[in-house]
Amino acid sequence: MKYELKDDYIELFKLLKVLDLVDSGAQAKHLIAEGYVNRNGEAELRKRAKIIAGDVIEIADASIEVV
């Protein structure tokens, strides 16, 4: 799936929440902290990582291309 940025960046946990991949911000933060989220092929453990255009986020079987 694709996500079009409206600003310069979006924080990782907010991206997961906006796309309804999690039920709550707390659940998003937990999944990130436990290493279940990849950014550009590597585990991303920072909940507030600034996701920018060109990044690819993977969680479970979902892949998000940020444009």
Image (tube, rainbow, N blue to C red):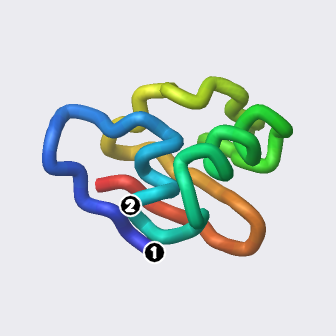
**Which residue was labeled with disc 1?**
1
**Which residue was labeled with disc 2?**
18
Q: Is residue 60 found left or right of 9 in the rendered image?
A: right
The three-letter code of the residue at mark 1 reads Met
Q: Please name which of the two marks, 1 or 2, marks the residue nearer to the observer.
A: 2
The three-letter code of the residue at mark 2 reads Val
Q: Would you identify the image quadrant in which residue 19 lies?
A: bottom left
Q: Is residue 50 found left or right of 21 in the rendered image?
A: left
Q: What SS does tag 2 mark? A: helix
Instruction: Tell me residue 27's x, y (percent).
Output: 67, 51
Instruction: Say the numbered circle drawn on residue 41.
Output: none
Q: Residue at x 64, y 71 (%)?
A: 62
How packed mark 1 is, by other alpha carbons closer than 10 Å (few <14, some 14-19, many 20 or more), is few
Q: Residue at x 32, y 43 (%)?
A: 53
Q: Quadrant of the C terminus?
A: bottom left
Compared to residue 66, the image places residue 21 above or below, namely below
Q: What SS does tag 1 mark? A: loop
Instruction: Tell me residue 25's x, y (percent).
Output: 53, 47
Instruction: Tell me residue 22's x, y (percent).
Output: 60, 64
Compared to residue 48, the image places residue 51 above or below, namely below
Instruction: Tell me residue 54's x, y (percent).
Output: 39, 45
Q: Residue at x 15, y 49 (%)?
A: 6
The alpha-carbon separation of the residues under discs 1 and 2 comes to 13 Å
